[in-house]
Image: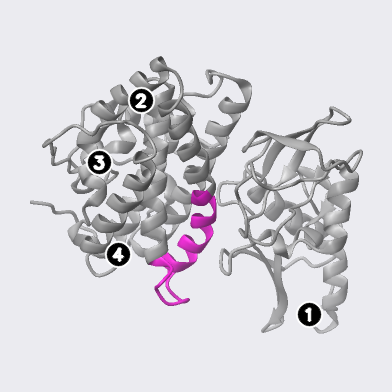
């Protein structure tokens, strides 16, 4: 079903890198449009963290791929079906509540994935990168979970918008509990699924939000199958490099 | 040019102390704690720098500034490397560095590395009037490494360097 020329190690690096980069690119759309100056700055700071983490993984992936490959060629010259990001990351920002929910869910996911990578040996790149990244994730998680609670337990309108966001985003959450085949020797499916559900429930239990029942959408962004949204993001992100290859600032 | 036999590691550290983070010009990178190692290997000088945050835009500038400062001091063949492990923490900021931050108007980290990151629960003294009567405005300030606080006594807003 899934085939490219890369080995498991490179695919796992691309999975982590692509998810960060697309999340970053999406959040950057808020730049200059945040509800307040402070929130605008918070989101762009978080987007910058994602970009930095993405670069770490791209640089390592490029070093493990034979031939002329760089972090830039991986970011700018692959098409949508070569991107391995979680579909959650490419979904439109929607309103403020929906963006907060996306950041929150990704923070819970990254916290578990990076924690798991910390158990690797010191020589392994994934451990080094995770030990750097997880400190940033802790702040994302704290910030987004507080906003989740503030909106969900706020006014009738903020609650209904959060409920609307949950209804819209929830089908894509199933993918966050799946370990791709190329990561099976590093991540545990059972642990990810249990831990993610437990941590998210601990936050949602403090709200009256209702999860949509019996609805699982089998998103497969991690295998290069995407919503139409990703192509639009890539078109905007890649257009300069594709029209003027190797252009630099 | 300084010959490799004559390289004095102490002198290299002195050169590095003239380079600062462009976002915090009062703070030498040696006090920020991002110089991981300075050593000679096969006659080549190596300087290892670690980023504060993975996406910090100052990171590339600092690497460039370090190379330029070393060249200007005669260390022309120095290898300036970016290393990410062990990850930098705010515990690596020296006591002098913390004082420099405070003098500059940025409250230094009040806790040890990630010991308490709940910004709504910690007490951050105002770097100007030293009052403890302060409150959080935003968890993310002008850069990723800082949060924005305000003093309820002298009414000045100020940056807080977050535990990391």
Instruction: Give the labeled residue for mark 3.
Output: A173
Q: Secondary structure at mark 3?
A: helix
Residue bearing mark 2:
A162
Please name which of the two marks, 1 or 4, marks the residue nearer to the observer. Answer: 4
* Disc 2 from disc 1: Cα separation: 63 Å
Q: Distance between the Cα atoms at labels 3 and 2?
A: 15 Å
* Secondary element at image label 2: helix
In this picture, residue B62 sits left or right of residue A95:
right
Mark 4, residue position: A9
Where the N terminus of chain B falls, by quadrant? bottom right
User: Quick one: A199 or A60, which is closer to the camera?
Assistant: A199
Q: Are marks 4 and 2 on the same chain?
A: yes
The relative height of residue B39 versus residue B163 in the rendered view (above or below) is: below
Give the mark, 4 or 2, whose residue is nearer the N terminus: 4
Give the residue displayed 31% in from the left and 33% down from the top: A90
Same subunit, tags 1 and 4: no
Quadrant of the rendering where the C terminus of chain B is positioned: bottom right
- Distance of mark 1 from mark 3, alpha carbons? 57 Å
**Are the residues flagged by discs 3 and 2 in contact, CB closer than 8 Å?**
no
The segment highlighted magenta reads: A117-138
How crowded pointer 1 is (Cα within 10 Å; few <14, some 14-19, many 20+) is rated as some
Closest to the observer, A56 or A4: A56
Contact between marks 4 and 2 (CB within 8 A): the answer is no
Residue A25, position in %: x, y? 43, 33
């Amino acid at each position: 079903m899934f085939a490219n020329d890369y080995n498991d190690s490179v695919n796992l690096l691309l999975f982590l890198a692509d998810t960060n980069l697309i999340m970053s690119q999406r959040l950057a759309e808020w730049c200059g449009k945040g509800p307040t100056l402070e929130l605008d700055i918070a989101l762009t700071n978080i987007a910058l963290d994602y970009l930095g983490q993405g670069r770490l993984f791209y640089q390592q992936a490029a070093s493990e791929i034979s031939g002329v490959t760089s972090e830039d060629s991986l970011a700018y010259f692959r098409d949508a079906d070569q991107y391995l990001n979680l579909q959650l990351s490419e979904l439109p920002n929607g309103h403020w509540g929906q963006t907060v929910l996306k950041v929150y869910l990704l923070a819970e996911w990254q916290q578990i994935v990076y924690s798991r990578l910390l158990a690797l040996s010191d020589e392994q790149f994934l451990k080094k990168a995770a030990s750097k990244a997880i400190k940033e994730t802790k702040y994302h998680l704290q910030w987004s979970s507080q906003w989740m609670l503030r909106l969900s337990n706020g006014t009738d309108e903020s609650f209904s918008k959060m409920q609307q966001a949950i209804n819209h985003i929830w089908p894509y959450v199933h993918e966050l509990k799946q370990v791709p085949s190329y990561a099976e020797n590093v991540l545990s499916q059972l642990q990810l699924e249990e831990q993610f559900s437990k941590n998210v429930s601990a936050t949602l239990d403090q709200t009256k939000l209702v999860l949509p029942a019996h609805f699982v959408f089998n998103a497969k962004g991690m295998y290069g199958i995407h919503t139409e949204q990703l192509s639009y993001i890539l078109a905007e992100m890649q257009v300069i490099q594709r029209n003027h290859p190797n252009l630099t600032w | 040019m300084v010959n490799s036999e004559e390289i004095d590691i102490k002198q290299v550290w002195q050169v590095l102390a003239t380079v600062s983070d462009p976002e915090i010009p009062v703070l030498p990178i040696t006090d920020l704690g991002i110089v991981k190692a300075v050593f000679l290997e096969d006659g080549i000088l190596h300087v290892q720098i670690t980023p504060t945050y993975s996406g910090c835009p100052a990171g590339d500038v600092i690497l460039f500034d370090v190379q330029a400062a070393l060249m200007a001091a005669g260390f022309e063949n120095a290898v300036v490397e970016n290393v990410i492990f062990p990850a930098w923490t705010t515990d690596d900021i020296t006591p002098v560095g913390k004082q420099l931050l405070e003098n500059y108007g940025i409250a230094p980290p009040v806790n040890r590395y990630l010991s308490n990151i709940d910004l709504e629960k910690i007490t951050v003294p105002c770097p100007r009037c030293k009052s403890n009567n302060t409150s959080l405005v935003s968890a993310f300030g002008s850069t990723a490494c800082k949060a924005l606080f305000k003093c309820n006594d002298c009414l000045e807003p100020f940056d807080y360097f977050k535990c990391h």
